[in-house]
Each structure stands twice: as C-alpha cells, then as structure tokens.
Image (spheres, helix red, strand yellow):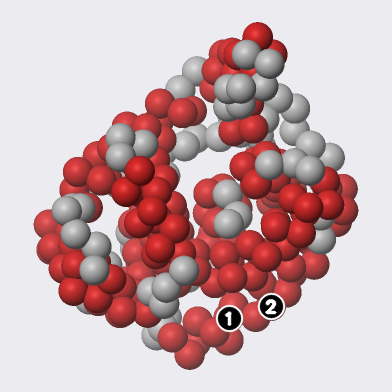
Amino acid sequence: MPGYLTHIIFGHKIFPNSLKNVKMFNLGLMGPDIFYYNISDPKYHIIGETLHNVDLTRLVKETQKESPEYALGLYLHSYLDMKIHPRIHIIERNTGKSHTKIETLIDAALLKKEWNTTVFRLDKHFFPNKLPARFMRIFDEVLYNYYEVEDVNIKSLYDVFLKNFFFLYKWYPIKAVASYVLYVVSAGRFNYKDYFIFRTPSLDILNEFGIETLWKESLNEIDQLLSEKFDQN
C-alpha cells in the first residue's frame, strides 16, 4: 500500500470544499491502516490485511450516514491502494528495498513536491481527538455484520492508534538516529530504520519508481469516479 502521507496528500489534492470535518476525512484516508498500529495482538494485522483485500463498499455506504467526510476518505484510500500498490511490489523486486522503505521514500518525496516541507517539520495533528458515538456504533456493527470481524471495537482501536501514531513521530530525529544505531549493532536483526527518513530523497525517485505517472493518472481519473459515487454539491 502507499504510505499514510501519500494517502493524505492525495486526498487533499482533490479535497471538496463542501466537506466540513477535515480530521474525519483524514481518518478515512488512513483506511484499514489504523489496525496496523495496534501491535498488542497479531489479530489486528490480520484484520488490516483482510480489509485491504475485500470490497469496502458497505463500510463506505454505512459510515456515510454519519460522516460523509470519513466515507469519502475511505473510498479514496481504497482507490489509491488499487492504483499504486501493484507498482510498489514491482519496485520491491527491482530494487531490493523493503515495502516500508519504499512507502517512506515516496511519502517524503511527495511531501516535498506537493507541500514543500519535510517529515521533520510537518504538523502531524491530522486526526480527531475522539470519534462520534454514532459513527463508532455504525463502524463496529458493519465490521461484525458484513466482514465477520469480532472482538474489536473502534473506540479502543482508535485510542491505541492515536497513542502509537504520535509515539512513532515524537522526537522523530532522535528516533531516526537510534533506529539506525540499533540496526547496525544488531547486525540487521532489528530493522526499524525503514520507518524513518534521514534525508529528503530527490524528487527524481517519483519518476524512477514510476509513481509520477500513476499520480497524474489518479488525479485525472478520480473526479469522474467521485461524481459517480458521491454528491459533492
């Protein structure tokens, strides 16, 4: 999948003026990736993988009743995954870089190209502090009734997501250096350095990786798709 910043940057490139709750939109742009931030039990990773491989139309339709912003973001997440994910697998095979490292490099390059900033300087307060009660009820019911996801509730999942998301980026430069030192002293057994950017990559990698073409294609296609799926007024 593309990294979280790629999803957010893409969403904000086509952000409809009619949307009021930007932070719920940003959460939707995360899609099922929020499950990956809970490492307390392998089931969360499995659920995240499962939701990336099923049709999320029902979740989009039902959450739209309470949060059209979240639903739109979720749709865009699924679309961009479909568009870019196969390319990332090709880049893995061609370069030998990890999936995480490729996502991180693309995130940093797009951040520089589109927003002219870096991961170090970016304000990462993208998401709401808490979720609406009715939204949480709908989300849990849809996951249980349509996707057979049991023993998971969005409130506790979201609390863990927020905590771990900010933990990952708090004192980012220090953790970046520490991750590299750990990688070296452990002879590569502990590789967390791929989650961090030590130097903003050249924008040329977007062309080298074939992302620039897919990015332009996606921006050209998405307006028509949204007009078919959503009433943006």
Whether residue 60 is visible, yes or no, is: yes
Query: Residue 230 location, x and y as percent?
Result: 41, 83
Left or right: 197 as drawn, with respect to 126:
right
Say above or below: 123 vs 183.
Answer: below
Looking at the image, residue 159 sits to the left or right of residue 57; the answer is left
- Kind of residue at disc 2: Asn
Residue hosting label 2: 220
- Which residue is denoted by mark 1 in the rendering? 223
- Residue at left offset 79%, top offset 37%: 201
Query: Which amino acid, mark 1?
Result: Asp
Callout 1: SS: helix
Q: Residue at x 24, y 62 (%)?
A: 149
> Looking at the picture, does residue 199 appear above or below residue 106?
above
Give the secondary structure at mark 2. helix
Res 180 visible: no
Are dots 1 and 2 in contact, CB under 8 Å? yes
Q: Which residue is rendered at x = 60% and y = 55% of the image?
A: 2
**Which x, y percent locates residue 173?**
59, 18
Q: Nearer the viewer, residue 135 or 139?
A: 139
Measured as percent of width and height from the top left, residue 5 is found at: 56, 48
Q: CA distance from mark 1 to mark 2?
A: 7 Å
